[in-house]
Each structure stands twice: as C-alpha cells, then as structure tokens.
Amino acid sequence: MTMQSPPPPTPPHKGEGRSTPLPIEVRGLRKVFRQATSGQAVVAIDRLDLVIQPKEVIAIVGQTGCGKSTFFDLMIGLEEPTEGAILIGGKSPSGDFDAFRGKIATVFQQDRLLPWRSALDNAKLPLELTGVPEAEQRERALTWLNKLGLAKFTNAYPHELSGGMRQRVAIARAFAVEPEILLADEAFGHLDEVTAAELRETFLKLARESGATAILITHQLEEAIAVGDRIAVFGQSAKLLADIHVARWAEGDYGTLREAIQQTLQNQKPDPRLHD
Amino acid sequence: MPLEEHREQVPVLKFPRQTIVSLLVFAVVWEILSHLSPYLGIPPFAIPSLLRIAKSMTTITPIDVAVTLARVIAALIASFAFGLALAMVMYNSRMLDEYLHPMIRILMAVPVVSWILFAVLWFPGVEFRIGFVLVVVCGPVFLVDTLDAMRNVPRDLRQMMRSFRPTTWQFFIKLMLPAIVPTIFTSWKVNISLAIRVVTIAELVGAVTGIGHQLSVAQELFSVSDVFAWTVVLVALLFLLEAGVARVEHRLLRWRA
C-alpha cells in the first residue's frame, strides 16, 4: 500500500458535530497470504459476510489465529482484500485510504504511544494529522485525558505512566479525533482483570456517548459479553459461526450464552442454543 | 513521582579521579623518559620535556584552531544533511535503495588517503578539496546509520501511525525523524571523531592553514614538542565537540527512562 500525499482535509469546525454515521458492509471478504519462504498460500479470511450498523457496538470473538487481527488490519485499510470488499459508507478503507483520515481511530493491544511525546502530545497526534488548529488540538486532547482520569498526568512521558494509564492515553488519542469508527484490537487483554474491567467500562461508556461505531476484537468471552449490542463469533479463517444480539439474552442467562459460544468455538459450528 | 521537568546540570567535561591519576602517571613516566633519553640512545628532540611541550602550547595559533574547527563543523552539517536526505529517499524507494546501496558500500571502502589524492588531482581549490573529502567520508556513515535506524523503527509504531493516515511528510516528521534521533546522536559522535582525523590528514597534504598544516610544519622542523602540543589541541577539540553533542543529546532525549 503506498501513501498518498494530498493536503489534509479541512477539519470540521468546533461544534459542527459528526457527519452522517457510516454503515459497514463486508461482502465475500477473502484474504490470502503467501508465505515468503515456501510460497504456500494461507487463507486468513475465507468469504466473510457481515453488516455492521452505524453506532453499533460489536465484539468479534474467536480463538487465536482465526483471522481476527487480519480482519482488523483490513478494516483499518492497512491490508487489501484478496477478494471481496469492505465498504464503509460505500468506500473501501484501503482503496480510498486518505478519505478516512479522521474517521477511523484505533486502540491496539499495546498502547503504542510515542515515547518521546508526553501524554498530552500523544493524545493530540491524530488531530495534528487532520489539520485541526493548535488551540483546538490542545483543548480536545485535554478534554479526553480528563474524561479518562489523567488530568494530572498530561505532561508525563509514557515511561512515567503505568500500563493502565498508558492504555488510557491511547484511548484518549483515539477518541480525541472524534472518529466515526472506533476499532479496538484486544485493547484490554494485557491488563490485569480489575484494570481491564474498569477501562473496558469507561471505553464503552465513552463510545456510546460519542455515537461512534465501535468494533472490539477479543479472544475473551467475558469481555465479548460485557461489550453489549452484538457478538460475532469467528471460526477458523474468520468463518462467521454465529451472530448474536446480546439484548435477546437476559442477564441471568449469560452463563448459558458463554457456554454456547464456547461450544461453538470448540466444535467450529453454531451451538443450537444460539439459534433465535 | 514528580512530573515537573528536571533541570540537571550536565558538566561539559568530566574528569573522574581515575582519569586524573592515569594522566599523572603518564606525565611522570614521560618526564622520566625525557631525562633518561640520552642514556637510552634516544635523540633529545624525540621525547621533549613537559616544560618544552608547555612552551610549545603557548605558541598555538588560535586562527588555525578556528579554521580546522570551522571546516569540521561545516562538513559535518553538510554530510548529515546529505546523508539524511538520501536515507529518506532510499527508505521510500526500494528500487533506488537497491541501486544505490552497492555504490554506498564502495564509497565507504575507499581509503581516506585515496580520497585526498583524488581531491588534490581533481579540484584546484583547497577548501573545496577538504570539504569534498570530509563529506565523501562522513556522508555515507550518516546515510547508513540513518537508514538502518529508520528500518528499525518498531513495526507497531509504524502501523499505529499509518492507521491515522498521515501524509508521507507527516509520517517522516512526526514518527521517523524523532524515532531515529538517538541513532543520529550516536552517528554524530562517531563522525566527529572521524572528521577530526580526516581533516587533519587532508590539511597535512594540501592546506596552508589549519591544525593539519601546523603538524606538517612541526614535522619538517623535527619539533616533537610542537607535534605533541597540536595533538593535545586536536584531542581537546574532539572532547569538546563530543561534550557539546552530549549536552544537546541530554536535552533532547530527556524523555528516555
């Protein structure tokens, strides 16, 4: 993928609000990698179809190596599909790469903060790339750092922060640009359970408040169920084994839901209990 | 943990006890050898006394020091600019990288003396000759170090940056350049040492000013004390330049744990 060098798009004026939310359509998506040494083809994603509605919060759960991270890279636009397409508002995130500047934001498993930038400067980074005026960059970044409980640490460098705090900065960085689509790839997986639960709750609250479409990729069933709205269960090669609307399950039945998803993953076919 | 900026005083030069003791022992041994040289069959001028060397130090001409320093600094800046620009181009273009890489390796393999002789034969102007030699020797070192550092910027950070869709320029300015700053400082320290030695040889052969030229005059006069004195100046110059770079490095890299 080559990077274009057009001038950044004009940022929205303060208070203008987000544009019309973008639906996400995945049609016949296929991604094949060729191993460099042997030339052997590896099918990472095999004909995935999925539709994600605007403002939906969806968890994608599957075992390690099932294609979740490949799907994540395709959603960001860092990889191109071998066949099929991902369309966000009718455009391809890889083909129309620059059109999505400021519209897609990511939170990775590791914080991936720039070590030479303070917490505030890290949170400002995507705003700098979209041409937001300096004063507004600072204001928005500070706002999000405050929401994430980091008001007293804006001048701290990443090495001066705990793992949980660094991940909060990464989340602030993602929200600061006010994206249409938020992608989180195992964003809480490396944290201890207490910190992860707290951060996950904060993330989801902020995601719903912001009105963004949020896609969380996880291998943890508890996390997938805690996310809310929908759970897409991926089998090997990202085969969609089950598409679950969590609202149809009573909270008291979450144990059954967890078991059903577990069985689905183990058997690589939908558990009967997941049928509507 | 305090988060306010630390303002540590960075000493320009450090002289720990061990360094001072080593230098004193060397000075004492040298002085003893100087006094014993007639009995050892060594010509008196070969190991001058410390007093003689100190007298030579008083005849150091500041203008020659300034000229050498100016040549070194100007050439290092030009070499760095050339190396960095070419590294950015080669990082961005695999084809150019593949074609230029063998030439860079050949350039680096050519001995300094050969470059000096080429310069004397090709160019009439003394300053251009010296500048040419310095840039052709130091430039590839900057280039290789910078390019390697760019390639070693963690994939995670590059992927994170790309996910936010920067322009090519933004990608370099906001990620690549800051990420390679530690390597740039290391490369500068290496090149300062290299440049001091190269400029000395270049001035020795083809210049009428500078420390190298003065060393040539001292050699023709068989004045070991003058050679010693100018060598001390060269070493001091090297240490001062390195200390200057270290000071800037300390300031710019305060974000490191």
Image (tube, coloured by chain):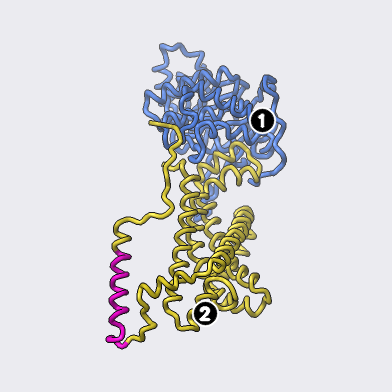
Chain colours: A blue, B yellow
| Labels 2 & 1 near each other (Cβ < 8 A) | no
Q: The residue under label 1 is which amino acid type?
A: Pro
Q: Nearer the viewer, residue B104 or B53?
A: B53
For the point 48% across and 71% down, the residue is B59
**Chain letter of disc 1 in the image:** A
Q: Position of residue A217 (x, y in %)?
A: 50, 30
Q: Position of residue B207 (x, y in %)?
A: 59, 75
Q: Based on the picture, tell me whether residue B31 belongs to the magenta stretch.
A: yes
Quarter occupied by residue B24: bottom left
Using the image, determine if residue A15 lies above or below residue A78: above
Q: Nearer the viewer, residue B6 or B107?
A: B6
Q: Based on the picture, tell me whether residue A176 belongs to the magenta stretch.
A: no
Quarter occupied by residue A28: top right
Q: Give the magenta range.
A: B22-41
The residue where tag 1 is placed is A133
- Residue A67 in view here: no
The residue where tag 2 is placed is B217
In the picture, the quarter occupied by the N terminus of chain B is: top left
Question: Neighbour class for label 2 at 10 Å: few (<14), some, many (≥20)?
Answer: some
Q: Position of residue A15 (x, y in %)?
A: 67, 19
Q: The residue under label 2 is which amino acid type?
A: Val
**Chain letter of disc 2 in the image:** B
